[in-house]
Amino acid sequence: MLNVDSLEKGVVIDHIAAGKSMEIYKFLRLDKLDCSVAIIKNVRSKKSGRKDIIKIEDKIDLDLDVLGFIDPNITVNIIAGGNIIEKKHLTLPQMVTNVVQCKNPRCVTSAERSLPHIFKLVDGTKATYRCIYCEQEYSANTK
C-alpha cells in the first residue's frame, strides 16, 4: 500500500479524473513552487472508480476557474493544522481567459496576438464554450 504523508498545511486537489493530474500540474505551473508537490495517479475511488490527487505542501492561490474548466468534479481542500478547514466544490466557469486558444484561423485573435483568448460557456450540460470574438465552438470534454 502506497503511503503519502498527510499535510500539516497546504492544498489537496482531489477527485481529479484519472490521468488529468499532469495537465493540472502544467496549467498551474506547480513545477515553479518551492515546496513539496505529490501527484498520486490512479487511486481507487468508490465514487469514480479511479482518480488522481495532487497534494501541495503550502497554501497557494489557485485559479479555480482553470481547475473547473479542466474537470468540474474536482474538490479543493484547504489544510491547516493537519485538518481540512475549507472544502471547495468546483463547477464549470462561465468564462475562461487564456486557458485555451481559438482554433479559427480567421478569428481576430490570430491576427492580434495581444488579444486575450476568451471563451464563454454556452451549454453547461455538454461543457461547450464559444469564442467571444468569432463564436468558434470549443468543447471542454474534448481537450
Image (cartoon, rainbow, N blue to C red):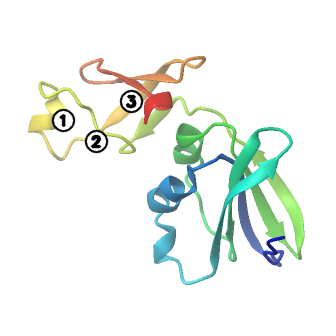
In depth, the one of 143 and 101 nearer the eye is 143
Q: Is residue 2 shown left or right of residue 103?
A: right
What amino acid type is highlighted by mark number 1?
Thr
Q: Residues within 10 Å of mark 3 (few under 14, many from 20)?
A: many
Q: Is residue 102 shown left or right of residue 139?
A: left
**Which residue of the protein is positioned furthest toward the left in this rendering?**
111
Q: Residue at x 68, y 76 (%)?
A: 58
Which label is found at residue 119?
3
Disc 3 or 1, which lies upstream in sequence? 1
Q: CA distance from mark 2 to mark 3?
A: 10 Å
* x then y, percent, for residue 61: 60, 63
Q: Quadrant of the N terminus?
A: bottom right
Which label is found at residue 72?
none
Q: Which residue is mark 1?
A: 109
Q: Residues within 10 Å of mark 1 (few under 14, many from 20)?
A: many
What amino acid type is highlighted by mark number 2?
Pro
Image quarter of residue 27: bottom left
Asked whether disc 2 touches disc 3, contact meaning CB atoms under 8 Å apart, the reply is no
Q: Residues within 10 Å of mark 2 (few under 14, many from 20)?
A: some
Q: Is residue 50 above or below residue 135?
A: below
Asked whether disc 2 touches disc 1, contact meaning CB atoms under 8 Å apart, the reply is yes
Q: Residue at x 35, y 45 (%)?
A: 98
Image quarter of residue 35: bottom right
Q: Is residue 130 above or below residue 70?
A: above
Q: Which residue is mark 2?
A: 116
